[in-house]
Amino acid sequence: MRNVAVIPVRMGSERLPGKVMREVEGRPLLGHLLDRVKLSSELSDVIVATSDFEENDCIQSFCNQQGVRVFRGSEYDVLDRILGALRSMNADNGVLVFGDGPLIDPQIIDDVTRYFLEHSQYDFVSNDLETSWPPGMEVEAFNVAALADSAVNCTDLEIREHSTLYIRQHPDRYRLKNLSAEGPLNRPDVSFEVDVEEDMIVIESLLKNFRDKPKTSLPILLDYMDSQPDLKAISSRIVRKWTRYRS
C-alpha cells in the first residue's frame, strides 16, 4: 500500500499572501514543514500540491531543490488538485498535511496514519472532525477511492475549495473516525497555525527556540507556549475561518 502525504499550498493565501515561502531562520515555512513530514515512518512518499498560477513557480523551484515532487492544478478546486497529486503518485491512501502548520509533530502524522491502516473499516480517519488538538496539528488519512468518489459527487465549488470537506460532511456515505486529543494534549486554546500576520510572531519565536530540531514534539511545544503567556495570548485570540465547518 502506498501512503502518500499531500501538502496543498499556494502563494495566494487570502489572509496572509505568500506565507508558505516566508523565511524564518533562513528557511521558508514550507521547508520547516517538509523537514517534519519527512520524519514520519508511516509514509511512502510526499508531494506538494500547488496551483498552476505563475506566482507559485517559486514553490515549484524550492521543492525541486529539496527533491520533493510537485503537482500543479486548479487554484481554487483544491479537491481536484489533491486528487490529481495523489493519482500522479499512484497512491492507495492519502495523508493530508496542511501547509499552514509548519510545526506539525511527526508523531501525530504517524498516529493518525497508523490508526487508519490498522482499522480498514474506515474510509477517513482524522483528528479534526472535532476540535481538541491545537490548531496547526491537523492530519487526515483516507483512501484515494473515497476521495475520488467525493470528487464525482461534490458539485459545490465552495466545498471543493476545502478538499476533504465533502467527505467530512457526509458520514452517511463515508465511514469516518475522529481521534480526539487526550489529557494534556487537549489544548485547542493554543495555536501553531499560520493564518494571519500575528501568527508569524508566534511561529518565529518557536522556530528560533527550536532551530534544527524538527523532532520537537507537541508536549514540548506546549510547555514552551505555557511559559510564554504573551505568545499564547496572541495565538488564542485569532478567529479561525475553519471554525464554521467544525464542532
Image (cartoon, rainbow, N blue to C red):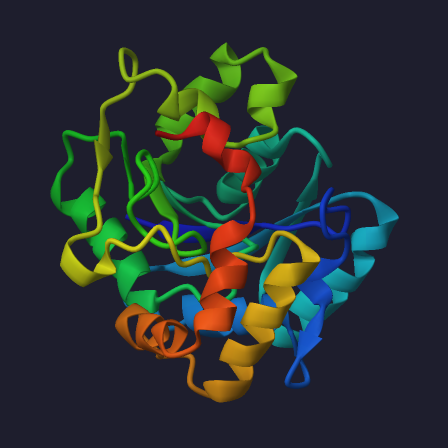
Residue drawn at (40%, 72%) of the image: 225
Rendering quarter of residue 39: bottom left
Rendering quarter of residue 32: bottom right
Question: Does 53 sit left or right of 106 as displayed?
Answer: right
Residue drawn at (28%, 20%) of the image: 174
Residue placed farthest to the right in the image? Answer: 54
Query: Where residue 144 sits: x, y (%)?
Result: 39, 34
Quadrant of the rendering where the C terminus is positioned: top left
Residue drawn at (52%, 51%) of the image: 237
Query: Where residue 180 sits: x, y (%)?
Result: 21, 44
Rendering quarter of residue 200: bottom right
Whether residue 211 appears in this view of the structure is: no
Query: Where residue 13 sits: x, y (%)?
Result: 72, 46
Using the image as rendered, state which of residue 98 and residue 150 is in the foreground: 98
How many marks the image carries: the answer is 0
Using the image as rendered, state which of residue 172 and residue 151 is in the foreground: 172
Placement of 131 over or under 18, stated as above or below? above
Placement of 19 over or under 24, stated as above or below? above
Question: Does 143 sit left or right of 38 as displayed?
Answer: left
Query: Where residue 100 sits: x, y (%)?
Result: 56, 55
Placement of 220 over or under 193, stated as above or below? below
Whether residue 43 appears in this view of the structure is: yes
Using the image as rendered, state which of residue 147 and residue 182 is in the foreground: 182
